[in-house]
Amino acid sequence: MRIQRTRRSGLGVTVVVFTIWVAAVSTNAPDEIVRVPTGKAVMINGKIEPGEWSDAAEVKMPSNACLYLKSSGEFVYLAVQFPASRSGFTDVYIASEDGVYDLHASAKLGERQLQGGKWPEWNNWWNNRGWVANVSQVESFEKRTFVPTNVREYQIERSHFRGRDWRLMLDMSLESPGGKYTVVRFPTSASDSNPEKWLTVQIEP
């Protein structure tokens, strides 16, 4: 277990990050291909309505979380459903023909690119051109608290990342008592700087 103390500007709270190596419950091993089917467009509102993702590829993740993937027209849709009664935010890592990127969604949206094997610090928020995700809603400005968020939904332009085959990794930052966050990674053995063990997703033409 590696413990690192840092600060997430998107939430304005101190985060204690625990990297947990949990046995994946997914039936899709990282070296298998998850085919992203064509389906209906989704409203990006952080809510999974009945049947809304029934036409998507479904990938089981640690702690009973779930990943949904589908495409519609010029967009790829992605949803991360956290474990029951858990709230949090996400970093979706995508490796394509033109680089490796981190798409962050919390109270802020931000994108950064892996450079020289290292991730730059977060200093440029709201640079999410070509994609959008639901953000945390403020519950109290005085207490700096947010409405619990159990789902993160993304809409990504297919042209934003070249090629039909993407490598994908997720960090789920799940809220714990005291305003701290526990990070659960999928695939669990993956490194955020090396896509070799990431999930392979293939988008239908």
Image: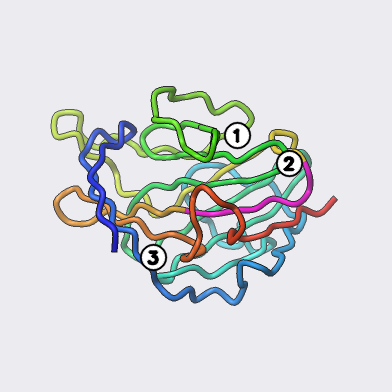
Numbered label attached to residue 24? none
Task: Please give the name of the residue rendered at 75% of the width and 56% of the height, measured from the top-left corner.
Answer: 202
Given residues 52 and 179, the one toward you in this image is 179
Q: Amino acid at mark 2?
A: Glu
Position of residue 98 relative to residue 42, above or below, is above
Q: Is residue 52 magenta?
A: no
Give the distance between the C-alpha atoms of the residues marked 3 and 1, in whole angstroms. Answer: 24 Å
Callout 2: SS: loop
Q: Is residue 17 left or right of residue 104?
A: left
Q: Is residue 103 left or right of residue 144?
A: right
Task: Please give the name of the residue rendered at 40% of the width and 31% of the height, measured from the top-left corner.
Answer: 108
Q: Which residues are magenta?
A: 163-170
Which residue is identified by label 3? 83
Give the distance between the C-alpha atoms of the residues marked 2 and 1, in whole angstroms. Answer: 17 Å
Which residue is identified by label 2? 97
| Residue that sits furthest to the front in the current view | 116
The x, y position of residue 163, in whole percent, is 78, 44
Mark closer to the chain start, 3 or 1: 3
Callout 3: SS: loop
The x, y position of residue 89, in whole percent, is 38, 47
Callout 1: SS: strand
Quadrant of the rendered image containing residue 96: top right
Which residue is identified by label 1? 131
The x, y position of residue 143, in whole percent, is 14, 34
Q: Amino acid at mark 1?
A: Trp
